[in-house]
Image (cartoon, rainbow, N blue to C red):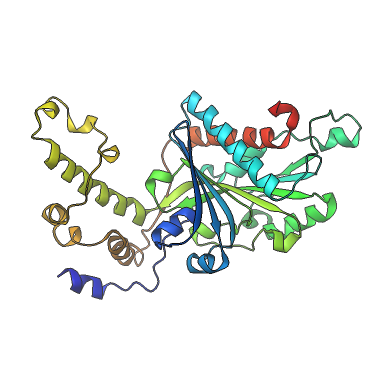
Amino acid sequence: MGDKMKHEVDLKNYTIRTDLALESIENNSLEKIKQEFETIENIKATTTYLDEESGKKIEKKAGTYITIEFEDVTDHDNLLNVKKVFSNKLNFILEKEHIKEDDLGLIIGLGNEHSTPDALGPMSIDKIIVTNPLYLYGELEEGYRRVCAISPGVTGETGIETSDFIKYIIDCVKPQFVIVIDALASGSIERVNRTIQMTDTGIAPGSGIGNKRKEISKELYGIPVIAIGIPTVVDAITIVADTIKYMQKQYTYSKQNSGKPKNKLILSHQTNYLKAKIEENKEDNKQLLGLVGGLEESEIKQLLFEVLTPIGYNFMVTPKEVDFVLEKLSEVIGDGINYALHKAIRD
């Protein structure tokens, strides 16, 4: 039955909606990719060096991708730690791109400020220390670099292709580098609002939600373009597929631990089974969910695509507390950029 279902599902049009290079690598099981791993204060940082061959396989540009994964930033101490790690990693890319301390930087916040899940860019721009006016009037203190910042809005509002608008600004201001901030899409519930990606490859606005626009990149502008993003949305297929996966893990965990005396006084809803070491058990999965339980995770997502897409129910979803969390995340991005760009603040 499992083979029959797999054969009947049409997979040719299915792609997982994600802007994260790390997820694309995981989903395609790519090997022989150079990666560096670091854990600081329970914050995981993965630096990936993607070559041309591997990039083509996952439809990502060759370059350096840094992925920072963390817990809830509404915790003050954790927010400070994430901010520090982010700033340090941004400094790494600035150095890699040979950007000097006195180079003029243009910071761009992409997105729609009237839609909270898409407002990361404009909200972060509000926290950027803009210093270029002080330089023009001869009042810029030592240790601060020249910085300009802008939120260009979205093409649907302005009627202007965002990439072309940015090209016009660059031609006028003549910065030595650009940092662009945007909200992303994730292919995992666990990474929504808990992941930062930065890369030296630039960005194609809207690609994660199927609304790909003209790219913003070094190839287009002739200067380094560093893209920073946080996934704030996930599609319905991923939510359902992840829920099925969690059901399977919880079921197996309960079977393995319910009979142990030390667990008899612990209520199941108080235990985070995701942090426990649970080996996948195919028979448990089939016992719990029958035919669907026998499918691989990728097959479940492919089946859900066939179910939800024709009826228009593959919604893009964001957590209900997104307003509060985005305020904290924009603080991480805005302050982190300030620390990285201005030596006087770091010291």
Residue drawn at point x = 68 percent, y = 34 percent = 338
Residues 49 and 331: in front is 49
Task: State which quadrant residue 101 falls in.
Answer: top right
Q: Position of residue 99 (x, y in %)?
A: 75, 46
Relative to 342, is 52 above or below?
below
* Image quadrant assignment for residue 291: bottom left
Question: Does the image show residue 151?
Answer: no
Q: Position of residue 335 (x, y in %)?
A: 64, 32
Q: Quadrant of residue 158?
A: bottom right
Q: Residue at x 62, y 35 (%)?
A: 336
Image quadrant containing the C terminus: top right
In the shown orientation, is residue 280 left or right of residue 150?
Answer: left
Residue 289 position in % (x across, y down): 16, 55
The residue at the point 41 percent across, 41 percent down is: 319
Query: Compared with residue 270, is residue 204 higher up or lower down, i.e. above or below?
Result: below
Question: How many marks overall?
Answer: 0
Quarter the N terminus occupies: bottom left
Residue farthest toward the right in the current orientation of the protein: 138
Q: Nearer the viewer, residue 44 or 182?
A: 44
Q: Residue at x 23, y 29 (%)?
A: 270
Q: Is residue 139 visible?
A: yes
Expressed as whole percent of the image width and height from the top left, the position of residue 184 reads 52, 50
Taking the image as shown, residue 180 lies to the left or right of residue 83, namely right
Q: As drawn, is 138 to the left or to the right of 7?
A: right
- Residue nearest the observer in this picture, 87 or 203: 87
